[in-house]
Image (tube, rainbow, N blue to C red):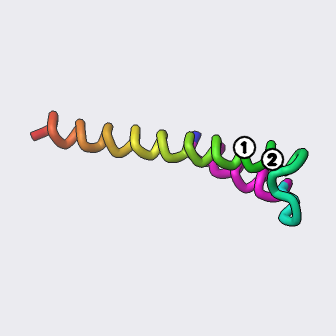
């Protein structure tokens, strides 16, 4: 899932028109990048919390 979120961010980055990044399809791409990076961050936090929980329960 993390890889998919990262690939979606890269794909949306190719769709941005850097002369007008907040107009038309570029705004959709910017929102897509923010959403996919947020999903990546949430999955990373989940992964780290599961590692911490396994260390606490293992000891």
Magenta stretch: residue 39 in it?
A: no
Magenta stretch: residue 12 in it?
A: yes
Taking the spot 45% from the left edge, 46% from the top edge, the residue there is 44
The picture places residue 25, in percent across and down from the top left corner, at 88, 46
Q: Which quadrant of the rendered structure holds the N terminus? A: top right
Q: SS class of the residue under badge 2?
A: helix
Q: Which quadrant of the rendered structure holds the C terminus? A: top left
Taking the spot 24% from the left edge, 43% from the top edge, the residue there is 52
The label shown at residue 48 is none
Q: Image quadrant of residue 17?
A: bottom right
Mark 2 or mark 1: whose residue is earlier in sequence? 2
Picture mark count: 2
The picture places residue 22, in percent across and down from the top left corner, at 81, 52
Q: Is residue 38 left or right of residue 52?
A: right
Q: Badge 1 is on which residue?
A: 32
Taking the spot 40% from the left edge, 43% from the top edge, the residue there is 45
Q: Image quadrant of residue 21?
A: bottom right
| Mark toward the viewer: 2 or 1 | 2
Q: Is residue 39 left or right of residue 10?
A: left
Q: Residues within 10 Å of mark 1 (few under 14, many from 20)?
A: some
Taking the spot 56% from the left edge, 40% from the top edge, the residue there is 39
The picture places residue 43, in percent across and down from the top left corner, at 48, 40
The picture places residue 20, in percent across and down from the top left corner, at 87, 59
Q: Is residue 6 left or right of residue 55?
A: right
Q: Image quadrant of residue 15?
A: bottom right
Give the prevailing secondary structure in the magenta stretch.
helix
Q: Badge 2 is on which residue?
A: 27
Give the spatial CA distance, label 2 vs label 1: 8 Å
Q: Residues within 10 Å of mark 2 (few under 14, many from 20)?
A: some
Q: What span is in magenta? A: 2-15
Q: SS class of the residue under badge 1?
A: helix
């Amino acid at each position: 899932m993390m890889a998919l979120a990262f690939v979606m961010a890269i794909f949306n980055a190719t769709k941005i028109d850097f002369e007008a990044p907040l107009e038309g399809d570029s705004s959709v791409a910017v929102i897509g990048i923010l959403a996919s990076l947020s999903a990546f961050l949430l999955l990373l936090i989940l992964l780290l919390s599961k590692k911490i929980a396994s260390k606490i329960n293992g000891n």
